[in-house]
Every structure is written in structure tokens, then in C-alpha cells.
Amino acid sequence: MDFSLSEEQRLLIETARRVGEDFGPDYWRRKDAAKEYPKECWDAICAAGLAGAMLPEEHGGSGLGMVDTALIIEELCAAGAGSTLAQIFMLNPIFGGVAISKYGSAEMQREWLPKLCSGEMTFSMGLTEPDAGSNSLEVRTFARRDGNGWRINGRKIWITGVPQADKMLIVARTVPVAEAAKRTHGISLFMVDVNRQGLTHNAIEKLGTNTLPSSSVFFDDLRVEPEELIGTEHEGWRQLLDVLNTERIVTTAGLLGTGRLAIKLAVEYAQTRKVFGDRPIGAYQALQFPLAQYWAELESARVLNFKAAWLYDNGEPFGSESNAAKLIASQAASGAAEQAMQTMGGMGFAKEMHAERLWRDARLFRFAPISEEMILNFIATANLGLPKSY
């Protein structure tokens, strides 16, 4: 097993580091305080060719793999952004890019993918509903036939980046649950303009990830044209899983960057802060051991995430690895950020030290995009062979 990086991968990491450092912690603190979308940062990422790393070359991408994408995201997030930046990769190269490149029409690929890579077009995904969170098969948003197209009615919640998005990947039922031959049948995917009559959205006030708004979205007879169907009508469940499973790898990469940054901030503070005599507080094992523990956990998640990414790139099943990596990384990144605050004492509560923002943002990913409990359910049944509990 070869863990060495190619020269191309080293260049990718260096490019991501340079771009990330141009938008360091102070930039993200300002954006967080103003609740502003980090457009300048995303534009720079696109200009550097990083947004389309895993998308086809013929459509403006680099034709690289998920391993390369994970390397890019981790480095960008470690430079100052924290985990929120990984969400923008979820919205665009994953929700937009994977869906279109794997299941979109030739016309969609030709027209939209180059604009995604350049940053001219941005995306969101409408999946979660008030009564259908982790249980995506229970979505009730319904697309009824209307001539050669559809009319969508329903509601979504906790949808990220809606005001900035040009397109939304909407998950809707096209066969009622009661009439479907099996629960996975009758789900379809549509890529629809956000700015269209019949689609409205309201922002949700929340604890963190302030640079990316979360919204409730309402569909009221939203017209969908036939060419906006992604993949096969009624058979969108498997296509949706292809999109969601890659989301785990992207999430984990962002959390790894967050953990690295949190530990770096804590160590820098502990090296210089003196309280009792001339010894820095970093000399005390009570502060050393928790940071060392989180470092070890993050490294373990990193190896597992790269295994998941490698399996994806080689067409192998990767669900167990991607879920387990996300489980460990979410706990370790959240813990590392909180421990950074603890290391800094009262200053850890100050926004100027950045640790509190890292903690607020990372905490989301212990229950999103999939909760710890659902990951453990998956491992218990898929890997341990235990009976399903839900």
C-alpha cells in the first residue's frame, strides 16, 4: 500500500495552501460576523482550477479523483476557513458536479459544468424535509405530471446556500409511497432554477456556519421542464446515493482541516502563554494530552477517509469507510476546537482567537449531513451483521 503523494498532488496541496492563506482566519471571522457569503474566496478557488478538480476535462475540470479533491479541501480548510468551506464544495462539485456529470444530459454537461468550474454558476440541493431528515425515503415533496413536464409541491428545510444558488437539485416523489412497488421506487431528481415562480425561501437563524445561509424552501406548483430531469424518472434513489456518499468524504476532509487548524491555534497560544513562573502552559500534560489525543484521532480519520476516496476512485464500495471516517473526524474536530478554547482559557471565548468559530461550525457535523447515531446504525448492520433497529 503506497501512501506517498505524487508530484501533481504536492502541487495541488501547495496551490490550495496559497489560496487558503490569502483568505485566512481574519477573513473568515469578518465574514462570519457579517453573515456574508465568502464569494471572493470561492472565486479565487475557481480561478486556481481547484473547484473542478474531479470534473471532466472536456467540461472545464481537471479530470482528477476524489483523493485529490480531499487533499485540496483539507488544505483550504486548515488555512483558516474551517469546516464551512467544505460545504461549498458539497454544494457545487458534489451536488451540482457529480449529479450532472454522472446523470445529467449531454446538454447540461456542456452548458453547466464549465460554469460550475469557473464559479459562474452555483448550486444547492433540496433534500431534507421537516418529517424526513435522515429517512430520505419518506420525502413527501411531490412532482405530478403536467403535460410533458411536472409541477412540484412541498417543503424542504435546512437547505444550504439557497440565496446564492443558480440551480437546485430537488429530490421529489413522482410515485406516491402507497403506490410504489418498493420504497426506493418513485423518487426522481430535478435540476431547477432557484429564481423561478413557485419557489420561495426563508432564512433560518442558527448557531454557526454563518457564511452559508440555511433556509426553509417552499414549492407551490413549481413548473419543471422535461429537460430538467436528472437521470431516470422514478429511479432517482440510487443516483441520489451516489451523490450523498461522496458528500461524506468532502465533509470529513473539511473536518480534518478544522482539527488541524484548531490544534495549531492551541499550540501557538500554549507555547507563549505563561501563568506560573517562566514555563509556558504548553509544558503541562493536562493541556498536552487532550491535544495529542485529538491529533491521533484526526490522523486515524484521515487515513480512513483517503481509503474511502481511493475506493471511490477505483469503483469499489466505500460506504463503510466514508461513514466511519466522518464519525471519527466530526467528534475529533469538534473536540479539538473546544480543547483549543479550553487551552486559551478566557481568551478562547473571544472571537479574535478564532477557536470559538471553529467550534460553532464543526459542531454541526456531528449530526449533519448524517448523524453519529445513523452512522453507528449503519456500521452495526452492514459491518457487524446485527439486526436492523429502525
Image (tube, helix red, strand yellow):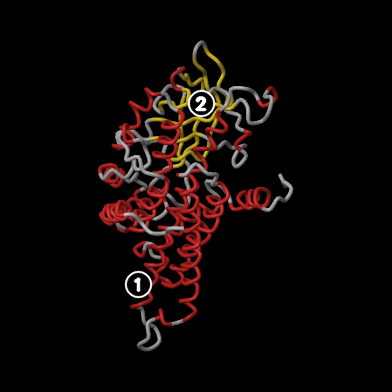
Measured from the top left, where is residue 197 in percent x and y? 43, 21
Number of dots carrying numbers:
2
For label 1, the crowd category at 10 Å Cα-Cα, with few meaning under 14, some 14 to 19 and many 20 or more, is: few
SS class of the residue under badge 1? Answer: helix
Q: Is 269 situated above or below 366?
A: below
Q: Is residue 73 left or right of residue 182?
A: left
- For the view shown, which residue lies furthest in the top direction? 147
Q: Quadrant of the C terminus?
A: top right
Q: Is 164 situated above or below 277?
A: above
Give the alpha-carbon distance from disc 2 to disc 1, as whole Å: 49 Å
Q: Residue at x 46, y 71 (%)?
A: 291
Q: Is 366 situated above or below 315?
A: below
SS class of the residue under badge 2? Answer: strand
Q: Residue at x 37, y 67 (%)?
A: 265
Measured from the top left, where is residue 252 in percent x and y? 47, 53
Residue type pointed to by label 1: Glu
Q: Residue at x 49, y 75 (%)?
A: 289
- Res 219 label: 2
Measured from the top left, where is residue 324 in percent x and y? 56, 54
Front residue of 183/26: it is 183
Q: Earlier in the sequence, mark 2 or mark 1?
A: 2
- Res 217 label: none
- For the view shown, which residue lies furthest in the bottom direction? 277
For label 2, the crowd category at 10 Å Cα-Cα, with few meaning under 14, some 14 to 19 and many 20 or more, is: many
Q: Residue at x 47, y 26 (%)?
A: 230
Front residue of 80/73: it is 73
- The residue mark sitting in front, 2 or 1, is 1
Q: Is 178 situated above or below 257?
A: above
Residue type pointed to by label 2: Phe
Q: Which residue is mark 1?
A: 268
